[in-house]
Image (cartoon, rainbow, N blue to C red):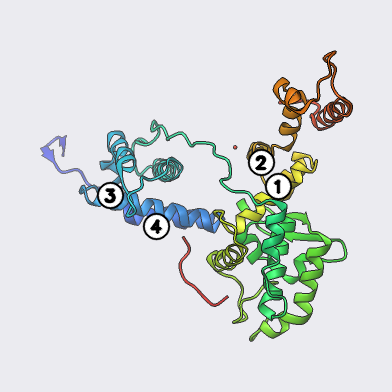
Amino acid sequence: MRKGRRGWRCARKKPGLSPPAPQGMWALREQYLEEMRARNFAFDSIRMWEAHLRRFLSWCDDRSLSEPTEVTQPVIERYQRWLYYYRQSNGRPVSFQTQHYMLRSVKRFFRWLTRQHLTLFNPAAEIELPRVPKRLPRDVLTAAEAEAVLGQADVKTAMGVRDRAILETFYSTGIRRQELANVRLYDLDLGRGTLMVREGKNRKDRVVPIGQRACEWIETYVREVRPGFVAGPDDGFLFLTVDGTAFSHGKQLSEMVRSHIEAAGIRKTGSCHLFRHAMATLMLENGADIRYIQEILGHSQLSTTQVYTHVSITRLKQIHQATHPAEQAHRGLESESGSLAPGVRELLDRLADEDEDDEPEDAPPSDEGHSPL
C-alpha cells in the first residue's frame, strides 16, 4: 500500500513484474543438467553430476529441504560430515576421492544457481573439498604377463581372433576402454600405423601410433571375422559383439579382458586399464620420453602422466645398485682403492647422458545394462 491524497490505497501491480514462483531443487537440477548438455559437456561428466546431485537432493529431502534458499553453508558442511561417516553396504567408507567429486558437483550446482539469480549467495562457495590422495596404480602388468594374457585368446575361433585384436589394440595404444569401443573402421590407418581417437576424454581428438603386430591382428579380424558379426546396417564400428552391435557398455569389454587375465593365472586387480598402465610403464622403462607418453595417453597435464615415473623404477634400481656402498660391497664392485669396478662407471655416464637429454630447456594432476559379447 502507498499513501495518496485520499489516504492509503493498494498499489497497482504492473504486469510481468511479479516475483517468480519458487522452484524445487529437483526441477532446478533438471534445468542445470539440460544447460550442461546444451553447452556440450561430456556425457560421462553429466551422468556423474546427475548421480551426485541425486544423492545430495535425496539427503535434503530427508531433512525437509526443498528450496535452494533453504540450503546454507552449515547445511552443506553437515552433508560433508555425513559423507565422511557414511558406510556402504560392504561396510567400507566412501573414499576421499569420491567425496571430493560429490562435493565438487554440489559446488558447481550452487554456483550455477547463483549465476541464475535463484539464490542471493552461494552457500557452497567457502566449502573446502577433501584432499585427494595421490596414489600409484595398484597393479601393473609386466611384459611377460601382458604376453601371457594375449596368448589366452583362442585364435582358432572367431571370437578368439576378435579378442586378440582387442587385446593387442589395448596393449599397443594404451587407449581407454570407451575410446576403443568408439573406434570406427575409417579411424584406423594400417598403412601408416596410426589410430584416430575421436572425442576422447574431455572431447579431445588425438592420433596415436599402433604397432605392426596389432595392425596384423586387426587386419585378420576385419577380413575374416568382422563380416560374420555384422547384422543389419553396418554402423562402421571396428569391434563388434556377436550380435553385430558396438560395445555400448564398457563393462562388456572389462568382463572380456578380465576373463583372459584370470585365464592366464594373473592375480592383479583391473582389466582394460591394466594394459594402459603397462604400456606407459614399460615404454618409460625402455627409454621413452614422458612427454611423448603424455601425448599418446591423451593427458592434458604432464603431472597426470608423471604417476608412471613412480611406477617405473628400473633406472632408480640401476643407480641404487651402482652407487650404494652396501650394494657395492655385497657384489664386490668396489676395489681396494675405492674406485668403481669396470662397467659401473660406463653405466653411470650413460644414465647421466639420458638424464640430460630428457631434461626440458625451461622447467617450470557403474554401467548398467548388458548385451552379449
Which numbered mark, 1 or 3, is in the foreground of this view? 1
- Identified by mark 2, the residue type is Tyr
Q: CA distance from mark 4 to mark 3?
A: 17 Å
Looking at marks 4 and 3 on the same chain, the residue that comes earlier in the sequence is marked by: 4
Q: CA distance from mark 2 to mark 4?
A: 39 Å
- Identified by mark 1, the residue type is Ala
Q: CA distance from mark 1 to mark 3?
A: 41 Å
Where in the figure is residue 284, as x and y percent of width and height? Answer: 75, 42
Q: Which mark is residue 59?
A: 3
- Identified by mark 4, the residue type is Glu
Residue at horizontal 72 percent and vertical 53 percent from the top: 143
Which numbered mark, 2 or 4, is in the foreground of this view? 2
Quadrant of res 214: bottom right
Q: On the picture, is 308 further left or further right than 133?
A: right
Q: Are marks 1 and 3 in contact (CB under 8 Å)?
A: no
Residue at horizontal 59 percent and vertical 82 percent from the top: 243
Q: Quick one: quadrant of the C terminus?
A: bottom right
Where in the figure is residue 16, as x and y percent of width and height? Answer: 32, 51
Which numbered mark, 4 or 3, is in the foreground of this view? 3
Q: Can you say whether 119 is above or below 147 in the image?
A: above
Where in the figure is residue 292, as x and y percent of width and height? Answer: 77, 44
Q: Which mark is residue 30?
A: 4
Looking at marks 4 and 1 on the same chain, the residue that comes earlier in the sequence is marked by: 4
Viewer can see residue 124: yes
Mark 3 residue element = helix
Q: Which mark is residue 280?
A: 1
Q: Are marks 2 and 1 in contact (CB under 8 Å)?
A: yes
Q: CA distance from mark 4 to mark 1?
A: 40 Å
Q: CA distance from mark 2 to mark 1?
A: 7 Å
Looking at marks 1 and 3 on the same chain, the residue that comes earlier in the sequence is marked by: 3
Task: List the residue tagged with mark 2.
Answer: 308
Q: CA distance from mark 3 to mark 2?
A: 39 Å
